[in-house]
Image: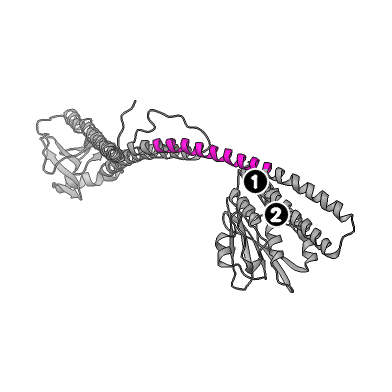
Amino acid sequence: MFKKYSIRNRVWRTVFEIALGTFVTILMVVIMSLSFLKLNIVTSHNVGERYRTEDKKTVKQLTNYMKSLGLDYVIFDKETNKIMEGKYLSKEISLFKKVVEEKSNLTLNSVHYDLYTNNNYYVVIRYNEIPEFSNHYFRNISYNMLTFYFLGFGMSISIIVALTRFVKEISLNFKKIKRAANKMGRDSISEQESYSKIIEFDDILRTLHAKGDNLKNLIDREKLEKQDLSFQIAALSHDIKTPLTVLKGNLELLELTVLSTSQQDYTLSMNNSISVLEGYFNSLISYTRMLSEERPAKLIIIEKLLNELHFEVNDLLNMNKVTYSLCNRLTSTSFYGDGSHLMRALSNLLVNAIRFTPVSNKKIEVTLSESSNQIYFEIWNNGQPFSENTLKNGNKLFYTEDYSRGSQHYGIGLAFVNGVATKHGGSLRLFNPARGGASAILSIKKNLQKL
């Protein structure tokens, strides 16, 4: 069991890590500078600082003393001004000579050339007020700028490391939340003693795990209820179809006898009613099966789907003398879904559209369009617009449409279409366009992985 902390404490911990890294960097710069000064790798001297050369009688003594200082110098013979020994850059030798010739110190910016004498020699010592490398090869590099760069680099590393640790920890917790959310309703999640070191994330993960198990139980229960409903409706349909079959047989026997005109009308009406009931129960069974079945999403070629759809309703279009037009604005050529259910849903929409076209000059338009994540199938007819009640409740099961669009529509067809749209991650929308008529738009998700 690890110790937990809040997000606020974790942020302060990050700030402390950055401050600690900055302090360590500054301490390293100080230690490095003191070490370099001690070892004469870097030199720095104050203005007016004096060096003892009077008691050094020989060139060797002067040379040893100057080496201990780590400074540039030139030893001149006092009588001939000849260079006896020295450590200097060749481009600066004229400056050393100038100091001896003029017998006065020379200052160029922060660099000083000071003259010292004893009985036999002139000694010109060069020093800089600003720290610099004693090695001539590195002298062009500013030691102060180097330390600033090192300090900035160290602070940047401290910030990057601290923030990276913080972001990784937060990102890891968000990934845990994502995994838990993706498993909700699908898999049972085993309970753990602790989920995260951060208190807020731990609370969220605990809640997600608890709600995930509850959601899975609800979904499993709903699946069982749908399967049970499908079974009950199938059994009910079978029970009702049996007497209907008997009734159809008796009607067929009755039609073999000599019937009056009114009796023929009665039998025709009875046969039509039986056909309506059979179609009604078949639609209801298809609807309940569609809700309870789980099918894998398969690749659907749009051109093939449209050809099959037109072939299926072509006879009905010709029979009713309907002018049919198709406008395909899709850039996509395929998508994933349940081809048979989608074909049935689009056929239902077309059949409804044909049913409610006007007596003459019948028109139906099918328009395909898309957005970034949805595909839209719009079916328009030039009949009467939907009533307000139909716009609100037209896709509900067992809805009976008002008389403005006919009294023989029970809503199972549109309920089936709405169910197919929902299983495909979309919806069914009824509306009355400004140009007149009525439109139904079936939308489905583009990148569907599972139904």
Please identify the quarter of the rendering in which residue 153 is found.
Answer: top left
What residue is drawn where x is 37% and y is 33%? Answer: 196
- Residue 446 is covered by the magenta coloring: no
Identify which residue, 375 or 210, lies in the foreground. 210
Q: Which residues are magenta?
A: 206-235
What residue is drawn where x is 59% and y is 72%? Answer: 434
Identify which residue, 286 or 174, lies in the foreground. 286
The residue under label 2 is 302
Q: Dot 2: within a 10 Å radius of its alpha carbon, few (fewer than 14), some, or many (20 or more) residues? A: some
Q: Dot 1: within a 10 Å radius of its alpha carbon, few (fewer than 14), some, or many (20 or more) residues? A: some
Q: Amino acid at mark 1?
A: Met
Classify 117 as above or below 425: above
Task: Judge whether residue 296 can be spotted in this image.
Answer: no
Q: Does residue 151 appear left or right of residue 378 in this picture?
A: left
**Secondary structure of the magenta portion, mostly?**
helix
Classify 314 as above or below 89: below
Classify 400 as above or below 445: below
Query: Does dot 2 land on a helix, a strand or a loop?
Result: helix
Please identify the quarter of the rendering in which residue 113 is found.
Answer: top left
- Residue 228 is covered by the magenta coloring: yes
Give the mark nearer the N terminus: 1 vs 2: 1
Q: Amino acid at mark 2?
A: Ile
Please identify the quarter of the rendering in which residue 90 is found.
Answer: top left
Task: Judge whether residue 410 can be spotted in this image.
Answer: yes
Disc nearest the viewer among 1 and 2: 1
Identify which residue, 9 or 1, lies in the foreground. 1
Residue placed farthest to the top in the image?
A: 1
What residue is drawn where x is 62% and y is 40%? Answer: 227
Residue 254 x, y percent position in the rendering: 85, 54
- Rounded to the nearest angstrom, the CA distance separating label 1 from label 2 is 22 Å
The residue under label 1 is 290
- Tell whether label 2 touches label 1 (CB within 8 Å): no
